[in-house]
Amino acid sequence: MKSAFMSQIHIGHRLRSLREQKGLKQKEVAEALGLSDHQPVSQIELGKRKITAQELVRASQYFDVSLEWLTNPFILTSKNSFSWRQNNVSDENLNSFEEVAGEWIGAFRELNKINKTPLKQILPRLSLTYNSSLNDAVTAGEQVSEELNLGDRPALSLADALENRLGILVLMIDTVQGISGAACALQDLNAILINRKERPARRNTDLAHEFYHILTWMEMRPERKEAACHSQERPSTHKAKRNQKIERLADNFSAGLLMPQKTLNLLGKPHGNLTKWLIEGADYLGVSALSLKWRLVNSKVCPELKRISSEDIRENRTYENNPELPPLFSKKFLETIDLAIQHGHISIGKAAKLLNFPVDELGDLFKTHSINHLGRV
């Protein structure tokens, strides 16, 4: 199977990466593996020589990494590639979940390579910098919304546009408690993870927010742990001020992206019970009533809405007890796995383990995205 050859290449790349991180020469690694000279190490690193089981165990012990890390081509090795939107999640829980999520993203990347399906990387260019104003961010969001042709209700078409037009992997997932979303930026792939159990307005806002981080990753890299609810307290350090400014820019970009002026115009002038009007308008657009309120106030379209309080909104807001959840993962993600199974690059059992899904229910998962090849599973 091609996956075995793929593993040898990845083992070689990972050994070389570990060696270079520690500033070692191939001769030193050769001694640790019980080899007589550096030549076999060079061949292993290039994927031209198969590493033996004994050599693999010695490498694992020498570099203090797991055998799984060395041999699983889906595990991400890039450091600082995630920014998590979360509230009070412990480092232990976050690290553990990041390993799981990273393997999903790594699997998508590697399986697309062996399926010979090129990954897209087409991102809009933003002229925003750390010194840009919040109004600049709103304008940039509106421009991107127009460029992507997101329509009258951008929140409802954003995920599809990101995945199918820009090549950003968008996964709707079940997370550990406290995580609402994440952005992941790799050299050859960008991904956004969204907790599918959040309310629709929250999912849409988080998606737009993380999209901003993907677009500005090099210029304004976000913190690995980003608070889902920003503190209103004045930050006390330069780093804290910088992080707060980045998050405020992201929030304002999101407002412009999901609620451009042409969309606001569709709502017309407020009338009747203003709180009810605001909630109904927010539901129609797929955003939160509070976000719509401040967008209308700040744009001076409806400054009278400023007097509506969060308490008013909560008192008038009703939620479905069991709202329908979006399907797990995404169609493009599962199509990639389905194609790899058909071509023998990954077994059904390994796919089930990767997705943390029972084998006998895997067919149903694929069917939720209208993928029927696994209906016999």
Image (cartoon, rainbow, N blue to C red):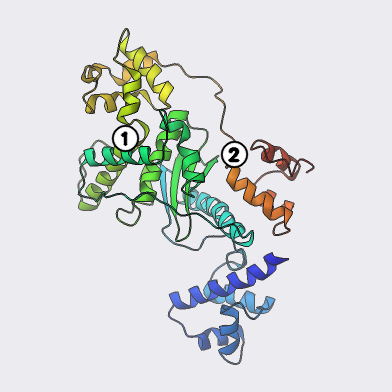
Q: Position of residue 313 (x, y in %)?
A: 35, 18
Q: Secondary structure at mark 2?
A: loop
* Residue at (35% x, 14% y) in the render: 277
Q: Residue furthest bottom?
A: 36
Q: Residues within 10 Å of mark 2 (few under 14, many from 20)?
A: some
Q: Quadrant of the N terminus?
A: bottom right
Q: Is residue 289 left or right of residue 37?
A: left
Q: Which residue is mark 2?
A: 328
Taking 309 as reference, is 124 left or right?
right
Front one among 98 and 256:
256
* Residue occupying image coordinates x 73% and y 51%: 348
**Coordinates of residue 101 in the picture (x, y in percent):** 53, 50
* 160 relative to 311 in the view: left or right: right
- Nearer-the-camera pick, 253 or 98: 253
Q: Secondary structure at mark 1?
A: helix
Please tell me which residue lies in front, 199 or 31.
199
Q: Which residue is mark 1?
A: 256
Tell me how far mark 1 sits from mark 2, CA to CA: 28 Å
User: Label 1 is placed on what type of residue?
Assistant: Gly
x and y percentages locating residue 198 in the rendered image: 48, 32
